[in-house]
Amino acid sequence: MIFYFSGTGNTRWAAQQLAEATGERLLFIPEQMKGNCHYELEENERLGFCFPTHGWMPPKIVLNFISRLEINARGHFCYAITTCGDDIGCCMKEFQKKLHSRGLHADSVFSLIMPESYVCLPGFKTDSEEIVKQKKAKANKDLKVFIGLIKERCIGKEIVFKGIFPYTKTYVLGTLFNHWLITDKPFKVDAELCIHCNKCAYACPVGNISIEGKLALPHWHHDGSCTNCLACYHVCPKHAINYWDTNKKGQYFFA
């Protein structure tokens, strides 16, 4: 059983590769949050979690899901993969802490560097086409290694890139980031560019965008559900959606 969350598609790709290689069930966390989050693992089934790193931490929706998770994972091999544009800081440490609160433990953890999608703050932008190509090629090779270890149920593997100053990034910068910047309030739409294609609403993994009427502009619900994954921004074919001043930055969606 593989639980995953994805916004711009990097983690979805990795989770799908895992599911195909292991033959195990693939479950999308936002959809699962609509139910009671109670599950039964088969005798030899593995338990996997795949999610992006947001601000050097696991996304809040992933942590909330684990808080509700009830599963018979006693003696079952458990693992986690996080995708990221670069380093992950202490993201996996925080993930393990949340698992431990539910009586679970990831036997092995991995980080997978993928093309960058975060563009909201100064200095952050998408990768060039050449870097995207290079990152995808390396990620494909790295993921095959991870899948091999997962299929063999290798315990104690920690193949992650924490980067420099991981504590500061997660517990100082990450705390500030996740407290103040995980919000949909700065999104805005250029009415002259919007073609009313509804792609932003379809792409939002948590259903946080509504478009009421054929020629209406998209609007965000401002109900706390936004994960700041930026799928709406990146999928817009006319670059009509911006988050603060991102109109001169690139777009990326896994393809």
Image: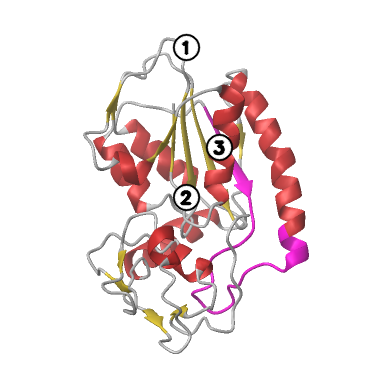
Q: Is residue 9 magenta?
A: no
Classify the position of the C terminus by image quarter: bottom right
How far, Cα to Cα, is label 3 from label 2?
A: 11 Å
Residue at left 78%, top 64%? 130
Quadrant holding the N terminus: top left
Which mark is drawn over residue 44?
1
Q: CA distance from mark 2 to mark 1?
A: 26 Å
Q: Is residue 214 left or right of residue 192?
A: left
Helix, strand or loop at disc 1?
loop
- Residue at mark 3: 16
Label 2 belongs to which residue?
6
Residue 164 at x, y percent in the picture: 61, 57
Q: Of all residues shown, which one is farthest toward the top?
A: 43
Q: Where are the magenta residues, as a range? A: 108-132
Furthest-front residue in this view: 214
The x and y percentages for residue 232 are 44, 67
N-terminal of the pair, mark 2 or mark 1, is 2
Q: Amino acid at mark 2?
A: Ser
**Nearest to N terminus: mark 1 or mark 3:** 3
**Lower position in the chain sequence, tag 3 or tag 2:** 2
- Helix, strand or loop under label 3: helix
In this picture the colour scheme is secondary structure
- The amino acid marked with disc number 3 is Gln
* Residue 199 located left or right of residue 136: left
